[in-house]
Image (cartoon, rainbow, N blue to C red):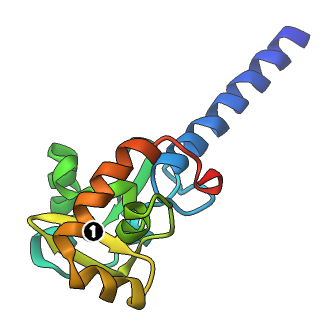
Amino acid sequence: MKSKMLALLALTAAAIATPAFAADENNAAPGLTAAGAPLGLHGVDPVAFVEIGNRVEGTAEFTAVHDGVAYYFATRKNMNAFKRAPEKFLPANGGFCTFGVSVGKKFDGDPQYADIHNGKLYVFLNEDVFRNYQKNKDGVIAKAEKNWAKIQHAAAGDL
């Protein structure tokens, strides 16, 4: 009985640890969705965003989990497109604010302040940060790409 209890505790700890690791590398909401993973991109459908540039709220009915993060979609078609090629639709820098990543920090990326640039989705903390990015998109993105390799695996609070 004691060994079964210890095994159950170990499995529970492992299940809890997995989403926490993903949340360090991906900007995801605290807590878990019904799919057992934290919600990414504030529930906005990444396929609709990339393909039509529109912030469409997804629904839990159409959920796909990628790298420990749940993404919601407005339609089954969008969910299936994501499952076929997630890298095409995932927000850059794990969904953290691209401008923040360009200066070595991890801040929330809010899809209300986002841009599709060269086919890739970039999200930002707020309107002021988004305006600064617009002054030098390619420069900010280049710095973010360089820094992301360094900070990707660091917890946001450690930066």
Residue drawn at (39%, 90%) of the image = 127
> Which one is in front, 152 or 2?
152
Q: Relative to residue 36, is residue 140 drawn left or right?
A: left
Q: Residue at x 10, y 64 (%)?
A: 119
Quarter of the picture containing the N terminus is: top right
Q: Is residue 78 above or below residue 10?
A: below
Up-down relation of residue 147 to residue 54 (above or below): above
**Which residue occupies the foreground of this view, 70 or 153?**
153
> Residue 92: in sight, yes or no?
no
The residue sitting at 42% across, 43% down in the picture is 150
Relative image position of residue 105 (x, y in whole percent): 50, 61
Q: Residue furthest right?
A: 2
Residue at x-position 30% and y-position 50%: 146
x and y, in percent, of residue 39 in the image: 48, 60
Badge 1 amino acid: Val
Q: Is residue 36 left or right of residue 110?
A: right
Q: Position of residue 129 (x, y in %)?
A: 40, 83
Residue density around tag 1, few if under 14, some if 14–19, many if 20 or more, within 10 Å: some
Return the residue at label 1.
Answer: 140
Instruction: Please identify the quadrant where the C terminus is shown.
Output: bottom right
Compare residues 16 and 7 and report the one nearer the observer.
16
Asked which quadrant contains residue 20, the reply is top right
Asked which secondary structure carries label 1, the reply is: helix
